[in-house]
Image (cartoon, grey):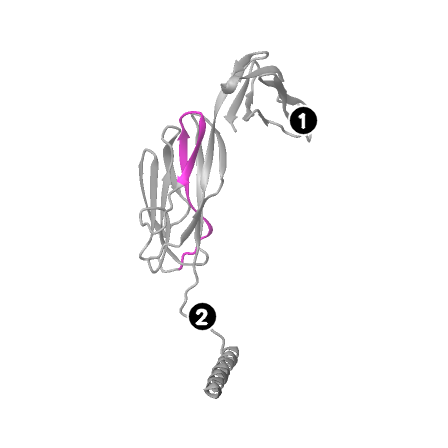
Amino acid sequence: MIKKTVIVIIIFLSLIGLLFIYRQKHPYKKSPTMSKIIRGEMLFRDEKVNVAVNSTFTTSLISNSNQADIVGFDIDLFYDGQYLKYANTENSNLDMFDLFTSSKEGQLIITGIKKVNYQKKIIFNNTQLVSIEFQTLKPGKTSLKLLRKNNSKNDSNIIIGNNTDILDKVNELSVNIGEITSLKKNQTITLNNNIKITLKDFSLAKQECMDCISGAQLTVEKNSEKKELVFKSGGIGGKKVNELPAFNYLFKIKEIKSSNVDFLIYEN
């Protein structure tokens, strides 16, 4: 009985050895039919913009298709109608697509379909799709967002020839809308969070003076803490300083006039 058991063990070990040798000579290979995963991108060119209230700004969307041939795309964009109003869309020389735009407050959908008579491949490589213009309605922070959901047909997408959506990455655009505030010399106003600002002094260079400097000095106070912001521009080879932060606010000179200074004030 013991002899038979030993023989069985020897045969089993021999089979294991033969299997190991076979695997060394014939390693596992992935099926050649397994396709490479293609990942596309649809991105706002900028991730942040500072803009004045009651004005307009334009943002661009770019796309990458990772060498895949594109037959269509959808841009499904959401925004807050309290802060922004859609104004216009401009095609970025994508003549090979028919574009369709629909909008309602808070949402903009742009669809691009490859023209049936266009026979060449279309590959997105940091390609600008469209430029979109918005009007700002009130000061504050808001954003533009591209809707992207897994396994959904009602969202942003990039479509290749087999009707597959390859869109994998999107981003959003942060929009900081500032309020225009006009100050005269020694005038003080109070912002939110009990922050006081005072225009201590300013100067406006004459246009004919190439070496003269325009500037302003702003005092920003919060409780017992105080910061002095010094803005300047002009002069031969002078460094321009027209935007400075203080206490979670960003102060930017919009225009220095003869009797006052206009500031753009943003919440950081």
Q: Position of residue 183 (x, y in %)?
A: 54, 15
Relative to 89, is 265 above or below?
Answer: above
- Dot 2 alpha-carbon crowd within 10 angstroms: few under 14, some 14 to 19, many 20 or more: few
- Spot the residue most to the front: 1
Q: What range is drawn magenta here?
A: 121-145
Asked whether residue 69 appears in the rendered view, the answer is yes
Label of residue 235 in the image:
1
Q: Position of residue 106 (x, y in %)?
A: 34, 34
The stretch drawn in magenta includes residue 170 = no
Q: Amino acid at mark 1?
A: Gly
Query: Which quarter of the figure is the N terminus placed in?
Result: bottom left
Residue at 31 percent across and 57 percent down: it is 116
Residue, disc 2? 30
Q: Amino acid at mark 2?
A: Lys
Relative to 140, is 114 above or below?
Answer: below
Q: Are the residues at dot 2 and dot 1 in contact (C-beta closer than 8 Å)?
A: no
- Dot 1 alpha-carbon crowd within 10 angstroms: few under 14, some 14 to 19, many 20 or more: some
Q: CA distance from mark 2 to mark 1?
A: 67 Å
